[in-house]
Image (tube, rainbow, N blue to C red):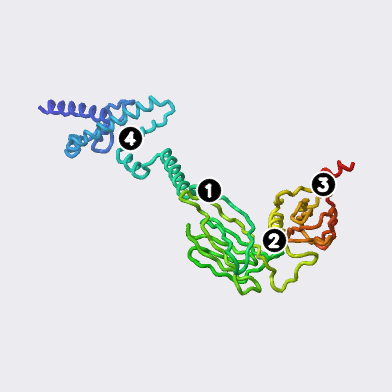
Amino acid sequence: MRKLTIALILGSLSTLSTVPAMAGVKILTPDGAEPENMARPADTAVQPIAAPPTQAQQTVDQTPSTQNMNASAASSTSTGAMSNNQNPSGKPAPLPPLPESKAFHDTLKSAMPLSAGQIAQLREAINANRRAAEAPLSPAQPRIETINARIGVGSPPSVSVQSGYVSTVNVVDAYGRPWPIVRFSVGNPKAFNVSVAGNSAAISDLQPYAQSDLALYLKGESVPLMVALLPGVQGTTGGGIVDYAVRLRVNAAEPGLPAPSGGMMGDANYTNTLLSMVQGVAPAGAKSLHVLGDPSRVTAWTWEGPRGKRLLLRAPGTVIAPAWIATMQGPAGIQAWVMPDVKVVTLSHDGQTQIIELQRYNWEAHHG
């Protein structure tokens, strides 16, 4: 009986020594040494024994959301693998553009309802309306004239004015010398704006179709020179004549100034002739003369006047010889003279004496 028990114990020990060796577990004897007959495979790797999953882990694995997350991760891994396979460079493929929504189109249309072409057409229409509203129905005709006037006698001279234009009135005496304006008075100051400097008055029409008068008080004269202000627009089509510059020649000399030496004041026989000359217009019947040397701003004519043949000269400066018959001063230092029919005139200009020789255009050919 004792021998059978010992044999069973030895067989059990032999079996147990084999299992720990396979599992990588050391079996020690009671004294701490390994049994001598323990089998140890030399090349057997030690493999850890995985612990069985807990009940909580089994619950998480069996949850439907966890299963969906695992499926999504697997799908993303699969898609990334496919993208890497389709893009040789290894870069991720760009995302497709987002589709434009209806709200975007509605906002763009409300902010910019017109296209670029429609805006251009609108601006052209606005410009056309402005041109039609601001342009006169008929263009105004400018006029520059000289008018003889008398202080306190006869009908006053008239000046045609128009809204949007400035008309100037220049007052001179019988010799053409500037006659200064010391003060003025306008009948309707709401319709006309007037400013004065020296012998010149500037008039602006503030109300279309308005009429008024203007009183000009000249130096040394207590009686004013009256001027009628009339609208230059004629009829309903607009247009008409507008006086840009009016030269008012008063048939008197400025008080306190001596008469020019060398002749008499231009009387009625030569007034219109002198008025034309100071404006650079030859009187009717006058023939041009050739001025030797072509001096600046010197013009001469021969003219058959009411008292015989006369020399007409227009030039800057003062005539020293011969004695002139009538004279009139013009703008910008220009002066006109009526003289006897001579061929040489002596002028004084800027302190220097100038000899003016005159010839007919066919005179040299006739005496050649």
Q: Say what amino acid the circle numbered 3 marks.
A: Arg
Front-lying residue, 158 or 285: 285
Question: Quarter of the image containing the N terminus?
Answer: top left
Q: In percent of the image, x 51 and y 50: which residue is there?
A: 239
Q: Which of pointers 3 and 2 lies earlier in the amino acid sequence?
A: 2
Distance from the alpha carbon under mark 4 to that under mark 2: 95 Å
The residue that disc 4 covers is 99
Q: Secondary structure at mark 2?
A: loop
Q: Which mark is residue 268?
A: 2
Q: Secondary structure at mark 1?
A: loop
Cβ atoms at labels 3 and 4 below 8 Å apart: no
Q: Could you say where residue 43 lies in the image, as x and y percent from the top left?
A: 33, 25
Numbered-mark total: 4
> In front: mark 2 or mark 1?
2
Distance from the alpha carbon under mark 3 to that under mark 2: 28 Å
Cβ atoms at labels 4 and 2 below 8 Å apart: no
Q: Around disc 3, counting alpha carbons within 10 Å, would you say few (fewer than 14), some (14 to 19), or many (20 or more)?
A: some
Cβ atoms at labels 1 and 4 below 8 Å apart: no
Question: Quarter of the image containing the C terminus?
Answer: top right
Q: Which of pointers 1 and 3 lies earlier in the amino acid sequence?
A: 1
The residue that disc 3 covers is 360
Please identify the residue farthest to the right as the structure is shown.
368
Q: Which of pointers 3 and 4 lies earlier in the amino acid sequence?
A: 4
Q: Which of pointers 4 and 2 lies earlier in the amino acid sequence?
A: 4
Distance from the alpha carbon under mark 3 to that under mark 4: 94 Å
Please identify the residue farthest to the left as the structure is shown.
1
Question: 300 left or right of 117?
Answer: right
